[in-house]
Amino acid sequence: MPKTFDRAPELPKMRRRIGRDTTELLITSLALLSTTGIVAVLIRASVFDIASQDEYNFIKYFLICTSAFLWLTVVRLEFTAKKKAEILYGTQMNEYEIMRTKWLEIASQKMDIEAKRSMDYSNLVQPSVMSSKPVEIKQVIAETTESDSKSDVSA
């Protein structure tokens, strides 16, 4: 899961099983060795120095029982690993839902902040209202002088 909330969390992947551990490796190796021993006893390999039929039957049945027990243990460990993988997936999905919810909340808060910032009136240039005073127009009537009056009459 991501440590930061800058991107959406990734959906976890369902795995078939969790990887093999040392116990599974050891039990599987012993089961294979026991099965090989059964085959060697059944073909009467010269590896085993078996003198009597009673000894042969004892070794054969002992190896068959041991092999069956080990293979059943391998199957049980396989099912346990699958169950652990399902539990891990369930936990990861719960974490994913929590992280996704938090990410969505943070993303919506970011969008709200950006929307408020873009719509904030303090960032806009306020129109300045100039105070207007009534303007008095003064009409100044010039006094007529003799030279002005002569020019008016001659015209």
Image (tube, rainbow, N blue to C red):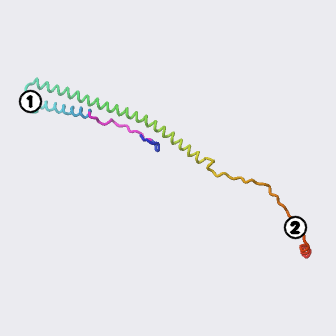
Mark 2 lies on residue: 142
Above or below residue 5? Residue 23 is above
Residue lying furthest left: 51
The magenta-colored residue range is 9-22
Horizontal side of residue 68 vs 133, given as left or right? left
Q: Residue at x 32, y 32 (%)?
A: 81
- Mark 1 belongs to which amino acid? Asp
Picture coordinates of residue 25, whole percent (x, y): 25, 35
Camera-nearest residue between 117 and 95: 117
Picture coordinates of residue 144, whole percent (x, y): 90, 70
Helix, strand or loop at label 1? It is: loop
Q: Earlier in the sequence, mark 1 or mark 2?
A: 1
Between disc 1 and disc 2, the foreground one is 2
Quadrant hosting residue 17: top left
Where's the C terminus, which quadrant? bottom right
Horizontal side of residue 155 vs 94, given as left or right? right
Camera-nearest residue between 56 and 111: 111
Horizontal side of residue 31 vs 83, given as left or right? left
Horizontal side of residue 56 vs 78, given as left or right? left
Q: Residues within 10 Å of mark 1 (few under 14, many from 20)?
A: few
Picture coordinates of residue 125, whole percent (x, y): 64, 52
Q: Residue at x 13, y 30 (%)?
A: 41
Q: Give the label on residue 137, or none.
A: none
Q: Give the label on residue 49, or none.
A: 1
Q: Residue at x 20, y 29 (%)?
A: 67
